Amino acid sequence: MRSLEGTRPGGRGGPGLPLKPGRCGTMTHDYKRNGTTTLFAALNVLDGTVLGRCMQRHRHQEFIRFLGAVEAAVPAGKLVHVILDNYATHKHPKVMAWLERHLRWTFHFTPTSGSWLNAVESFFSALTRQRLKRSVFRSIVELQTMINRYLAVRNADPKPFTWTKTAGQINANLNQLNASLH
């Protein structure tokens, strides 16, 4: 589970120069920011589906609302393990109180600089590469519509998440990360 903060619609004064062999694409210098949206997303690693919600802000109130949406979507009796970064919103006292009332839920926090451990990062990476990068959105509604369309298309043919490294390789990387931090 993660949120993509600061995704913003904006417009540019004109189109960039056309792509040519040996020349990268360009963008104009003038950029108009039209607001931001926050995308909260939860990846079901077993079947590859993503539950996502765009919200105006990234505070504990919005995060609790998103947790409620996930709670409603997960069948009763199933345990819910959530991988989170150490963002303050995720550890707010009201979020922790919500967690205490929902006994089937367990939060696991990634270490600093360990966001790669969170499988939903692959979803955010694909969304950024395939839909957000170099796109122009003239309003927040247009941006949110595109994000929701991307979610629908992706969930129509989901792919389960699979690690490309073995547990031993991952543990070796974690040990190296811990050694560099301490």
Image (cartoon, grey):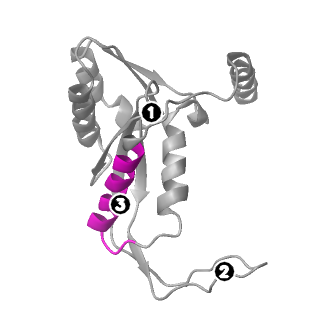
Q: For label 1, count other residues whose C-alpha is less than 10 Å away and answer few (under 14), some (14-19) or many (20+).
A: some
The amino acid pointed to by label 3 is Met
In three-dimensional space, the C-alpha distance between marks 3 and 2, rounded to whole angstroms, equals 24 Å
Residue behind mark 1? 48
In three-dimensional space, the C-alpha distance between marks 2 and 1, rounded to whole angstroms, equals 35 Å
Query: Looking at this rendering, what residue extends furthest in the right direction?
Result: 22
The amino acid pointed to by label 1 is Gly
Q: Secondary structure at mark 3?
A: helix
Name the side, left or right, on which 123 lies relative to 44: right
Task: Give the residue displayed 57% in from the left and 84% down from the top.
Answer: 16
Residue behind mark 3? 146
Name the side, left or right, on which 53 lies relative to 165: left
Residue 19, label in figure: 2
| Residue 29 image position (x, y, % from top left) | 55, 84
Task: Give the residue displayed 22% in from the left and 15% down from the top.
Answer: 76
Circles 2 and 1: CB distance less than 8 Å? no
